[in-house]
Image: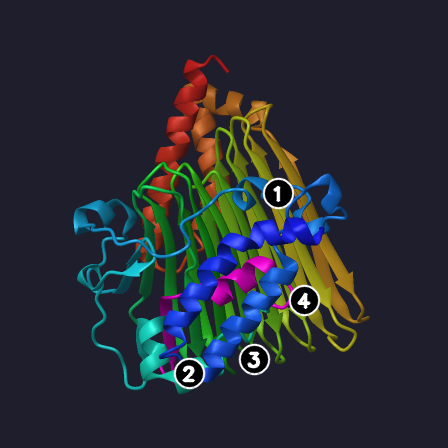
Amino acid sequence: MTEAIKQAETARYTTFYDAFDRVLSQDAPLWLHRLRSDAMAHFRELGMPVAREIAFPLREDWVYTDLRGIAETSYHAGPVEARLDEAALAPYEFGQDDWHRLVFVNGVFSPALSRVDGLPGGAVVSTLAEALVEHPELVRPHLARYAEFERTGLTALNSALFENGLFVYVPRGGHLETPVHVHYVTAGHDTPLATQPRTLIAAGDGASLKVVESYTGLTEQAYLTNAVTEIAVGRDGNVDHYRINREGAGAAHLSTTQLHLEGNGRISTFNMCMGGALTRNDTNARLDGEHAVVRMNGLFLVTGNQHVDNHTAIDHAVPNCDSYEVYKGILEGRSRGVFNGKVFVHQDAQETDAKQLNKNLMLSPDAMIHTKPQLEIYADQVKCTHGATVGQLDEDQIFYLRTRGLSHDSACSLLTYGFAADLIRRLRIDAVRSSLDTLFETTIRDLSLARDKAGR
């Protein structure tokens, strides 16, 4: 990419950053100011991964996802005040009044819609902005330590421009029984809006917690969400993490989720995507202590001209660690999907057990999926498998269900729902499992009805 193109793509963000930095650096600690400045320097250098003839060779992991529309859009790069009430959020919540909840609307924290009560001793659930003031000694060891902005322009952009987000800390041996729900909401606005949500979760040795991270769009206008989440789990710690994307029809959703596990640490993460015009999720895990275990599951359902790209990377850095990954996609209309899953096994990471599977169900002849599971193994004593499938609904199964009295529409709905339900039923928070189960069942039934009316 030439310097002229790079400057054109980064100018609007660097201009905002200069004004942003002058305001916030007055009260920010020196280490945070340096972090932001370093991140912006890397964004200026890296830019966005945009496919242009003069920009080749493009990084291979961006070859199927084109960000030209984002790079060429002049977004309003700061938070915008907007008022919402409980009724507007209710369809996107999980019906649990006792959960810890933090809500951000257009990048601005909403105290009226948030609540945090009854935390165990030493635990912190707060906005990241508040934690940087009141608990810098807890934030500094983890912030920007795992999601490396030196390599990725979008992560660098978030690290330079984030203003707020969720911070959760559970000390050694602590147990946060009540789930934490952080809800990032985008509402109507006059011009395209770009927000930079930042989520930081740290579980000490032997600590456990559950976090639900929701992204919701209450507008069909164009906007950009560029999110970064970092999750660190100490020895013998346990974290359940669910990420729910129900962005608006005009949204571009770009995210990086970075997981870091110490010895005997466990993370179970689930990434669900149904919203947005364009979605790119990078989910990466580093197993950095023996007997660590990561379970990384994902499910997406896209229709029309939606595009979703899931890239995952699991880094087995030490011996005796396990990883289990299943991603499923359901594609309708002219939608496009991408799955690229990588498992790296280092030379010293003997006795690794890694399993990876990607399965895709095509409901339309015009839909398309690019799938590439990968293993890169440098150790000898390992058990590693990977696989991918792409297919349509089985006509024999449809016929069998019709002989049992189901209509063609009902048979297609049942088979499609069964494809998705396998992953949904693995979720360990009852309210989330029930809500998503109903959401998928209803959406799949509506899609089947629409296909039946169209004569397909």
The circle on residue 353 is 4
For label 3, count other residues whose C-alpha is less than 10 Å away and answer few (under 14), some (14-19) or many (20+).
many
Q: Which secondary structure lies at badge 3?
A: loop
Query: Mark 4 and mark 2: span between their CA atoms?
Result: 43 Å
The circle on residue 262 is 3
Residue 103 place in picture, x, y as percent: 28, 59
Q: Amino acid at mark 2?
A: Pro
* Residues at marks 3 and 1 touching, judged by CB atoms closer than 8 Å: no
The circle on residue 29 is 2
Q: Residue at label 1?
A: 65
Q: State whether residue 88 is above or below residue 324.
A: above
* Marks 3 and 1, the one that precedes in the sequence: 1
* Marks 2 and 1, the one that precedes in the sequence: 2
**Residue 314: quadrant of the picture:** bottom right
Q: Which secondary structure lies at badge 4?
A: strand
Q: Is residue 171 visible?
A: no
Q: Is residue 158 magenta?
A: yes
Q: Is residue 80 left or right of residue 44?
A: left
